[in-house]
Image (cartoon, rainbow, N blue to C red):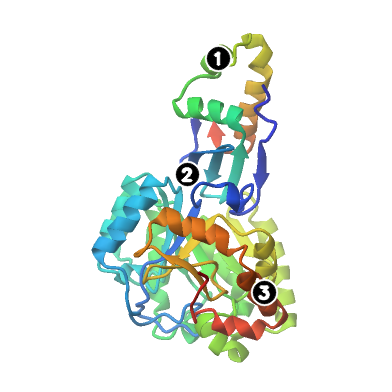
Amino acid sequence: MEPTKNFNTTPGMAGESFDDFKAPLFLAWQINSVCNLGCLHCCEDSGHHIPGEMTRDEIFNFLHQVREMNIPYVAISGGEPLLHPNFFEVVEFIRESGISLKVETNGEFIDDKVVDRFVDFDFRSVQISLDGATASTHEVLRLKGDYKKSYTAVKNLVKKGVTTEIVFVPTKFNIHEVGEAIDMAYDLGCYGFYTGKIMRIGRAALNWDKLNPMEEQYKTFFKTLDEKTKQYENKMKVYYYPYDVIEELKYRLEKPSASLLIVPNGNTKLIGPLPFICGNVKEQPLAKVWDRYKKAWHEPKVIEFTKRVIKDPSLLAESNKWQNVF
Amino acid sequence: MEFKKHVQVRKEKFGMVIFETLKEKVFVTNSTGADIVERLKEKKTPDTIITELALEYITEPSAIVDDVNCFIEKLIQHEVLTK
């Protein structure tokens, strides 16, 4: 008897191999596409409804399968998820099912009443986008955004004991403020601060030349992150993904994650930066979509296109022009 | 002894996957490890687990005590289990 024989750790969501898992370990679910903001760097080009968004019945049919398949962890994003008419009953169902839940939001709809409801839900975390340490920096990127509302949401959530994280996307407009933003996150009492290189997808791809920081700026950015990681060690999690989307694709081609990315109309993408759809959770059982996901990563057309993207990153602009793998 | 608040476990063909969702770290065990994890989920003590597994694996408790304790210690080190 050697229980420790195969006991090991694997970074991220990779597990042993994604093929070994009977179900996804993680669902990234974009519940809607509607958003009150028009962020220049949005990776989804969110703002308006898209055709065929899941109905309430379709959503709950899907969620029952998530529970039956014992999927341990779900992240809900959008659009702006709090604008979804069924948001609260959805999160209630997920939490009552014992599934860990992260909510990714711009924070602008988190008033005192919502904070109290969030306390009861006991989320894994609430992740709020704050793209600067000042209102002017945040709002130049987040068109129609209200820094004060997001900042206040973070403050009030932390005060009530909700695990709260800040997400910061570096661009030419705000990269210089990352150090101050991390200090601010710590002063606010956040659990974590998340960042990484901006992804060349969605609306960010359209605004790429305007947004993408220079290499020199990135060098300073990562140096600051190294320093802040040490400064806040054991006090606050400073997490940054050091690779860009191309490096991510190279890695995922070898080792796909045990996760699914579901967009508001039920389409299930292989990964954000690629246009491939392996199924639709409105039309197929979730278990079948998972099988198709596993098969899709072995499909020559997926492998070949991914290799083309790696050679020519401008193809990332096609990430939201969905193509069915099968 | 109990699993931390954000830890989820799921049985798999190969054994068990343990997912620390707050730190987003995944651990996998073989089927023997899964037998221990299941009992820890039921809040059984190490002594009870050793007794039960010795019966199940048709062996003496003394033959498995170190392995079980070492495995539990690893779970604690990886911060998925608390004493």
Amino acid type of the residue that numbered disc 3 sits on in the rendered structure: Glu
Inter-mark Cα distance, 2 to 1: 26 Å
Residue A175 rendering spot, x and y as whole percentages: 62, 78
| SS at mark 3 in the image | helix
Q: Is residue A112 left or right of residue A200?
A: left
State the residue position of label 2. B6
Q: Is residue A195 left or right of residue A122?
A: right
Q: Earlier in the sequence, mark 2 or mark 1?
A: 2
Residue A271 rendering spot, x and y as whole percentages: 55, 68
Inter-mark Cα distance, 2 to 3: 38 Å
Amino acid type of the residue that numbered disc 2 sits on in the rendered structure: His
Task: Look at 25% across and 64% down and name the residue there.
Answer: A56
Residue A118 visible to the viewer: no
> Disc 2 is attached to a residue of which chain?
B
Amino acid type of the residue that numbered disc 1 sits on in the rendered structure: Asp
> Disc 3 is attached to a residue of which chain?
A
The vertical placement of A270 against B55, above or below, is below
Q: Is residue A324 left or right of residue B76?
A: left
Task: Look at 50% across and 60% down and name the residue there.
Answer: A292
State the residue position of label 1. B47
Locate the N terminus of chain A by quadrant: top right
Inter-mark Cα distance, 1 to 3: 54 Å
State the residue position of label 3. A304
Q: Which mark is residue A24?
A: none
Label 1 Cα crowd, 10 Å radius (few <14 / some 14-19 / many 20+): few
Q: Quadrant of residue A4?
A: top right
| SS at mark 2 in the image | loop
The vertical placement of A318 against A297, above or below, is below
